[in-house]
Image: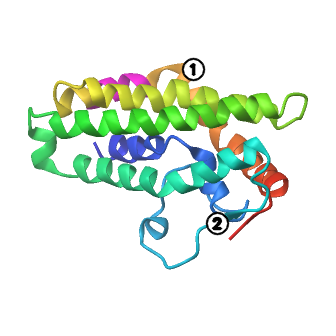
């Protein structure tokens, strides 16, 4: 069960590039908050220098949403580490989490779709495509499974099936490298500092 919890948390943060946009390109860009990232800091929010560029303006909006995304990821972690929740037949909290994540995932998907459009002909275009696929196959499916779950146990079963799908596994495997490339590209194109 611990593996499932850790895996769900890793994919729940449906915007792998947000971690890359929120600091240097050398940071962890899997989208899953590390314990250090989960702690509140007084560090200033990253700044985007070129918000006249549509992709950079969208990156700024996504950076602003990254705290909410990390918070939602933490909420799922707490639920899945609570034995009482896991043994319960009440999926109300999980359903709400899924509904909230679907909104965040939709925004993230829009960012990657814009990235594909704005980088046509550039090598990073393939990375935006990979991240868009990741959001479709992994993040949206996870959020929808939570929104539709009839119980926490059913949700865990559905997610285990999700993890066994080869397309989903391929999308998840490609996401960290693609996120690193996109983060580096955005830092340069958009003048992201902080």
- Which residue is found at the position 50% from the left and 32% from the top? 106
| C-alpha separation, residue under disc 1 versus residue under disc 2 | 33 Å
Residue 120 occupies quadrant: top right
Viewer-proximal residue among 144 and 8:
144
Q: Quadrant of the C terminus?
A: bottom right
Q: Secondary structure at mark 2?
A: loop
Residue 126 is left or right of residue 130, and the answer is: right
For marks 1 and 2, give the one nearer the viewer: 2
- The numbered dot on residue 167 is 1
Towards the viewer: 20 or 96? 96
Figure check: 39 above or below 123: below
**x%, y% of residue 156?**
27, 31
Q: Position of residue 73 (x, y in %)?
A: 39, 50
Label 2 belongs to which residue?
A: 46
Residue at the spot x=59%, y=45% of the render? 16
Give the extent of the magenta segment: 156-163
| Between discs 1 and 2, the one toward the N terminus | 2
């Amino acid at each position: 069960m611990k593996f499932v919890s850790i895996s769900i948390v890793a994919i729940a943060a449906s915007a792998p590039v947000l971690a890359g946009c929120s600091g240097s390109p050398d940071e962890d860009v899997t989208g899953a908050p590390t314990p250090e990232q989960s702690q509140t800091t007084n560090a200033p929010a990253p700044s985007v220098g070129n918000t006249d560029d549509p992709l950079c303006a969208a990156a700024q909006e996504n950076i602003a949403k990254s705290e909410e995304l990390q918070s939602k990821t933490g909420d799922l972690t707490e639920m899945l580490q609570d034995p009482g929740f896991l043994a319960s037949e009440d999926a109300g909290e999980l359903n709400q989490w899924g509904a909230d994540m679907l909104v965040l995932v939709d925004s993230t998907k829009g960012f990657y779709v814009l990235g594909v459009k704005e980088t046509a002909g550039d090598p990073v275009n393939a990375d935006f495509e990979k991240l868009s696929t990741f959001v479709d196959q992994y993040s949206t499916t996870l959020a929808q499974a939570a929104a539709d779950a009839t119980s926490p146990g059913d949700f865990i079963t559905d997610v285990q099936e999700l993890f066994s799908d080869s397309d989903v596994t391929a999308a998840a495997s490609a996401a960290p490298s693609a996120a690193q490339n996109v983060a580096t590209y955005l830092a340069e194109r958009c003048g992201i500092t902080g």
